[in-house]
Image (cartoon, helix red, strand yellow):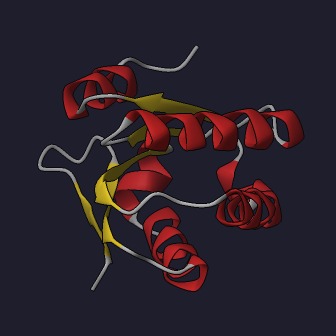
Amino acid sequence: MPVTTAPDARHQFQIVLMTKSCSVAECRASLDEAIAAPAFIERRTLLVDRREADLVTVDFVDEMVSFMASRHDVLVGARMAIVTGSDASFGMCRMLQLKVEARNPDIAIRPCRSYDEAVAWLSVPAG
């Protein structure tokens, strides 16, 4: 399975792990699962680990922006850290961040270059 979801060990955030190639449909299904999980509902935080995932396209980013807009009511106040494995992936995640936050300013996304950076950002209360 190219996408899995689970709470982190301390239940501070929900983790979405993406490996290799995953379709928009698989990504959407996993994000729906993640935002329905108790760890997300309680803390409003997601860590998306894309270090082993294939590079996404602009069309993929646009599909995910539309998907997140369609889940706006559930994602209000959410924070999502996306860990990337390359400069190109970081750039695509930065594009996602800018597009999502332009349409939904009450959703915070942060591309991160390391897992520790993502955990540190999600561990600090929003505000």
Residue at 52% across, 81% down: 23
In the rendered image, the residue lying farthest to the front is 88
Name the foreground residue: 42 vs 83: 83
In the rendered image, the residue lying farthest to the left is 9
Name the spot of residue 67 as percent of width and height, x first.
74, 67
Name the foreground residue: 61 vs 4: 61
Residue 91 placement: quadrant: top right
Q: How many marks?
A: 0
Residue at 30% across, 42% down: 85
Name the foreground residue: 92 vs 41: 92
In the rendered image, the residue lying farthest to the top is 127
Q: Quadrant of the N terminus?
A: bottom left
Name the spot of residue 59 as percent of width and height, x first.
73, 65
Left or right of 58 on screen, residue 11: left
Residue 70, above or below 47 = below
Residue 25, above or below 75 = below
Residue at 58% across, 13% down: 127
Left or right of 49 on screen, residue 40: right
Name the spot of residue 27 as percent of width and height, x first.
51, 73
